[in-house]
Amino acid sequence: METTPVTDAPSSAGWTPDQPLVRLVDVRKSFGSLEVLKGVSMDVAKGEAICIIGPSGSGKSTLIRCINALVPIDSGTIRVEGQEVNDPDLDKLALRRKVGMVFQQYNLFPHRTALQNVMMAPVHVLKQDKAEVEARARTLMAKVRLADKENAYPGELSGGQQQRVAIARALAMRPDVMLFDEVTAALDPETVKEVLVTIRELAEEGMTCILVTHEMGFAREVADHIYFTDAGVIVEHGPPATFFTEPRDPRTRGFLSKIL
């Protein structure tokens, strides 16, 4: 097993942008007797796009849910901008302002318009000025190429359009890092591209992105670094240029031979 070298993690107060924005050190997580994460370490720099790939059940989704404190870890450390995610005194709202997340299922409120869905968290959770949030939400709807769908309800939108609304909703919190958990897995093939284009543009603009994906062509094109997980460990990682053409571990080679 290969893991990213790590050093002592900085304190929240001492974090600077030249240090990893997200740092995982020896993260372990079990559900009952099943150990899902077996000592995972990873550094993600500010502005970097990371793709995590691997077979079903390899721990990918659990890993990024731990970063957002949706799943508590059993041991190890996860720090976002120097803040320990596993701290029992953690302000989870403050963390989730920093760490946006988009899921496979869109989870939009069906009785709210697309624009209202984007506005809800900043207005009702963060208590931000409604006029300012609305202006920001309209900008984000245009950014995901849905300016003409602001007044549409989720049931009137395609799956790809709903997923782009979900991305705009996450961006409305002004996060420093975005997590994407198999966001195209539930989409029809013809709507996958429009979602991937939106994510690609975010990465190109410098948003720090951590993506669990099965879209290998997209990972090759967008990622700065690829991590391959299997049975709860990081088997191998590297830049796309070498990862896909010169995999070193037999498990990596076997996985890629089945999907490429």
Image: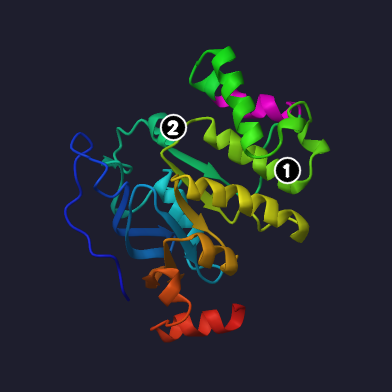
**Does the segment drawn in magenta span residue 117?**
yes
Which residue occupies 48% across, 20% down? 126
Region rendered in magenta: 111-121
**Does the segment drawn in magenta span residue 242?**
no
The relative height of residue 212 versus residue 103 in the rendered view (above or below) is: below
State whether the magenta stretch is mostly helix, strand or loop.
helix
> In which quadrant will I find the C terminus?
bottom right
- The amino acid type of the residue labelled 2 equals Arg
Q: Secondary structure at mark 1?
A: helix
Furthest residue in direction right, as rendered: 156
Residue 54 in the figure: left or right of residue 146: left
The relative height of residue 66 versus residue 132 in the rendered view (above or below) is: below
Report if residue 94 is visible in the image.
yes
Residue 174 in the figure: left or right of residue 120: left
Q: CA distance from mark 2 to mark 1?
A: 23 Å
In front of the other: 138 or 109: 138
| Residue 124 location, quadrant | top right
Could you tell me how many numbered marks the image carries?
2
Q: Residues within 10 Å of mark 1 (few under 14, many from 20)?
A: many
In front of the other: 24 or 18: 18
- The amino acid type of the residue labelled 1 equals Gln
Q: Which mark is residue 161?
A: 1
Q: Secondary structure at mark 2?
A: helix
Which residue occupies 32% across, 46% down? 21
List the residue tagged with mark 2.
97
In front of the other: 250 or 205: 205
* x and y percentages locating residue 77 in the rendered image: 28, 51
Report if residue 230 is visible in the image.
no
* x and y percentages locating residue 37 in the rendered image: 39, 63
* x and y percentages locating residue 178 in the rendered image: 48, 45
| Residue 88 location, quadrant | top left
